[in-house]
Amino acid sequence: MIDVLLNVALVLLSVSTLGFVYRVIKGPTTPDRVIALDAIGINLIGITAITCIVLRTQAFLEVILLLGILAFIGTVAFSKFIEKGVIIEDERKS
Amino acid sequence: MKENLEVILAFIIVLGALISLISAIGVIRLPDVYTRNHAASKGATLGILLILSCAFLFFWVEDGYMNARLLLGIIFVFLTAPVAGHLISRAAYYSGVPLWEKSGQDALKTKNKQGKQKQR
C-alpha cells in the first residue's frame, strides 16, 4: 500500500519535471528558463526524499542538502548575471 | 498503529506531488514571466515542503529518533526558495522583460527611473 502510493507520487513528480523541462526548452526569455531550472532542482529534492523512503534508507539525505544549496546558488548567480552582466562585482574597475 | 500512520503520511506525499504537478501546469500555461514565477516558486515549494515534512515524520516513526539532516534541509528549502523567486523576478523586471499586455497595473513603472539612477 505504502509502496504503491510512493510510486504514484514518483510518477507525478516525474511528469511535473517534464513540464518544467518543456518550459526550459521553449521559454521565450532567459528568466523563464532560470525559473524552470530552479523548480527542477526543487523537484529533484522531492524525488530524492521519496527514493529514501522507498528504499528505507537514510543514505541519500545529504543529497537533499547539497541539491538545495546548489539550486539556490545557481539561481542567485543567474539573476545577478541577468541583472548586471557580471556575477561578482569588481569595485576597482568601475 | 504504525502502519496506519505511515499510510496517512504516504497520502500526504501524494498530495504534495499533486501540488507540484499543478505548479508545472501553471508554469506551462501562464502567459508571462512574473505569473510563471508565481506558480513555480509558490507551488513547487509548498509541494516539496509537504513531501520533506512527511519524510521527516516517516523516519521518525520508522526509526524512533529525529533526523537532523532532513530537518536542516526543510529549513533551508523553506528559507531560500522565496528569496530565489524574488531575486529572479527582480532581475527579469530590471532587464526589461515586458509584462503581459493584459496586466492590470505596473506598480514599479514610475519608480523605475529613480531606482536605476540610485543603482548607478
Image: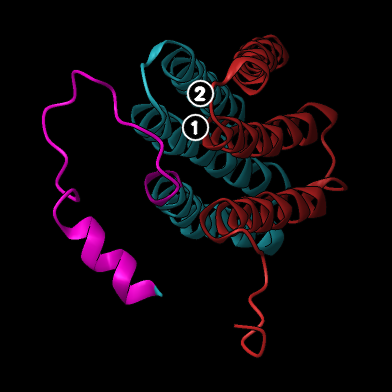
Chain colours: A red, B cyan
- Under circle 1, the secondary element is helix
Asked which quadrant contains residue A19, the reply is top right
Residue at 54%, 21% in the rendered image: A28
Could you say where residue B58 lies in the image, as x and y percent from the top left? 63, 39
Q: Are marks 2 and 1 in contact (CB under 8 Å)?
A: yes
Residue that badge 2 annotates: B20
Up-down relation of residue B66 to residue B57 (above or below): below
Q: Nearer the viewer, residue B115 or B27?
A: B115
Who is closer to the viewer here, A83 or B56? A83
Q: Amino acid at mark 2?
A: Ser
**Which residue sits at x=84%, y=45%?**
A60
Question: In which quadrant is the N terminus of chain A drawn?
Answer: top right
Q: Which residues are magenta?
A: B92-119
Position of the C terminus of chain A, as image quadrant, is: bottom right
- Sort mark 1 into few (<14), some (14-19) or many (20+) by Cα contacts within 10 Å: many
The answer to whether residue A65 is magenta is no
Q: Position of residue B48 (x, y in %)?
A: 54, 36
Instruction: Return the residue found at the far bottom.
Output: A92
Instruction: Classify mark 2: residues with Cα within 10 Å, few (<14), some (14-19) or many (20+).
Output: many
Number of callouts in the render? 2
Q: Which mark is residue B44?
A: 1
Q: B23 or B57: which is nearer to us?
A: B23
What residue type is disc 1 on?
A: Ala
Q: Residue at x 45, y 22 (%)?
A: B23
Residue B120 x/y as whole percent: 41, 75
Q: Position of residue B4 (x, y in %)?
A: 54, 23
Q: Quadrant of residue B83?
A: bottom left
Q: Is residue A40 left or right of residue A80?
A: right
The answer to whether tags 2 and 1 share a subunit is: yes
